[in-house]
Amino acid sequence: MSDEPKASGVSTRALIAWLVGAAVLVAIVAVDYTVHHHAHFTADGIDVDAMPEFFPLFGLVSGFVLVLLSKTLSIALKRKDTFYADD
Amino acid sequence: MQMTDLPPAAVLFAGALLLPLFKGKWRFAVALALPLLALADSWAVITQGGESFIPFMGMTLQPVHVHAATPVFATIFCIMLAGGVLFSMNDDRRVELTAAFVYAGGALGVAFAGDLVTMFVFWEVMTLGSTIIIWSGRQHDSYGAGLRYFGMHALGGVALLMGIIIVVTQRLHEGAADPLAFGHFSAMVDGWSHLDWDNAGMWLILVGMLVNAGAPPFSSWIPDAYPEGSTSGTVFLSAFTTKTAVFTLLVAFAGVEVLIYLGVYMAIYGVVYGVNANNMRRLLCYSLVNQVGFMLIGIGVGTKLSIDGAAAHAFAHIIYKALLLMATGSVLAMTGRFRLGELGGLYRTMPVTMWCLIIGGLSISGFPLTSGFTSKSMVVQAIVDESSRMAALGEPHTYLIVTWFLFQAATAGVFLDACVKLTWFIFFQKDSGLRPSDPPWNMKAAMIGFAFICILLGVFPGLLYQILPYQGEAAAYAKVVYSLEHVMVMLGMLGFSGLAFFLLLPILKRGSYIHLDIDWIWRRFIPRFWKEVLLPLLQQLDNAQKAILESLPGRGMRDPSLPAPIARRMGNMWAVSVPVFLIVLMLLVYLVAYFVLPTL
């Protein structure tokens, strides 16, 4: 993890952490391709979740959408944390 | 009278009375022994199928009754209390500890309540106990938060009581054999046929229960009140109120569709607000709402598997949420800081706390080999099963498919939020320069114990499955829970949601902000409206009226010929002028209406 950053910006530990993380994610996707995935809602003609890359992609997109939704709301709803204490 | 005639909660209430008599190590020993005694007593009652009846106004109270969901909830309430006691013991908080026993006793009482009156009484006992815990928090806003918390639960309690009165009155009219019975509008006992939505009483009961579950629009009391508890107080608070509400909903309203929609809202709300939260314990309170949302979805789907899933998830959730709050509480206790932006780099000196937080975080996300995986996945599977059943019957079920996808998205979100974000900001990110040690041994022991249970239930889910409402259903599910496909789905989804966190890290740096919620209406809008609009308006009205009165012949009160003290006293008497004016106005409107609309 990022310890004291060097002058160049990124510490070696942060780099290693990123590489290890990336390796884990690649491994998950690789194994995913060897596993048979069932579609959950076949009766309704939805089979997108039977693709091996569906859930990694779904997790990534969900994370992005939720964080961006949260940040968008934050623009309007953000107040200093002394907001109510000022009363 | 036998021991099993008494509700097991009596053990905890007796404890609350006894504890102040002991000191030091003795109190520690007694406080640890009592929840275990209550657990043993609960199981004695459960295995003997204990029932007790008390005549009450021509009806029957049933303070001891074993519902299908009683074993799992009674067990977890007792374990939780013991863990919380262990965690709190280094800090001499007599009032809080006694209140915790009252609070847990209330929860245990509800789990064994066979009638609506008993349920309501224990329900209110919980409100008292928990409010005192918040007030003993000694945080900067504990007093105000406790008041707001009490107001909210008093309101929910009134809805519940009104509902109970209506339902019982109706049952008496219908000549029901057991008008007070709790559980007879339950899918778990009688099937769906007893639900009658023309019945306002049932709606009020549902609303009363939902207030305690933190359902919208009243979700905000959880992140408002709970972070104001002490390090140990918040651990107690997180366990009982919402999960008792889940228990009562499970008994009374399984299969009610509206719970699914409320649950989906809560699951998403918890993540969206959690991502923005900067107070680490408030973040966990938001994810508490998210998790209770999952339970509500399970209850709303209403199949045997989904009900088992909701009950199992409540059990698992109490453990890992307490664990997460213990870990963050330890950080708070050792550093005195609660804002994520002010922490960082603690991995060096608090390794035990860090690993416990990570295990709790993985559990809340449903990571394989943790308790969250084996409990939450039951609800997920139940949604799929119910959807295909309804598809085969040609019934509308699109909402179940949408629910399933949103459920999964919220799962990915809570991993990002309550696991990765929390761990990263507290233990890594930039070095805050803080070098606190791990907390005292009892706090570590409580954390390690609960972390152990998280893993234990993840590896041996059968331990929990065998005390669920429908053991047979759960036992069948136990055979497929660890399919390779299940595991890979979770690993893929969670892994890449974690990636999303690090990619978005630049916009996730936090300042000291809160985010407005619906409680803004009663915390800010209504007080301000009164102070700045309504009150000045009434004062203007008062002045105008005084001016009119003074201009009248004789000039009423301000007769200059009167001695000053008398004039002042008479002046004071005009304080009622505004109400009198309003009443006259109202009577005038009524009089006009009476003649214009003769049907009134």
Image: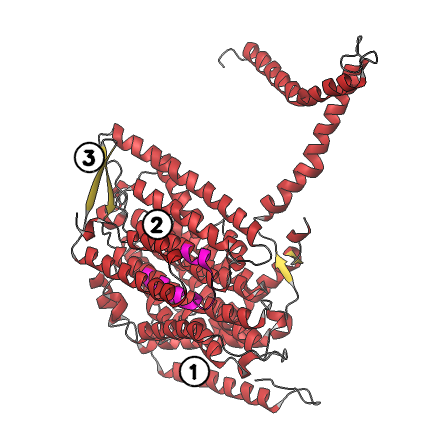
Residue corresponding to mark 2 = B249
Within 10 angstroms of label 1, few (less than 14), some, or many (20 or more) residues? many
Crowdedness of circle 2 by 10 Å Cα count: few (<14), some, many (20+)? Answer: many
Above or below B487: residue B73:
above
* Residue numbers of the magenta segment: B78-98
Name the residue that disc number 3 marks.
B177
Q: The numbered mark 1 sits on a residue in which chain? A: A
Q: Amino acid at mark 2?
A: Leu
Label pair 2/1, CB-CB below 8 angstroms: no
Do the residues at discs 2 and 3 belong to one chain? Answer: yes
Task: Find numbered disc 1 in the image and state the secondary structure of the residue it sits on.
Answer: helix
In the rendered structure, does residue B497 fall within the stretch colored magenta?
A: no
* Closer to viewer: mark 2 or mark 1: 2
User: Does the magenta-highlighted stretch encompass residue B97?
Assistant: yes
What residue is shown with label 1? Answer: A28
Residue B300 visible at all: no
Chain ID, mark 3: B
Give the SS element for disc 3. Answer: loop
Where residue B205 appears, x then y in whole percent?
Answer: 37, 41
Is B137 left, or right, of B577 in this rendering? left
> Number of callouts in the render?
3
**Labels 2 and 1 share a subunit:** no
Question: Label 2, label 1: how many angstroms apart (C-alpha)?
Answer: 39 Å
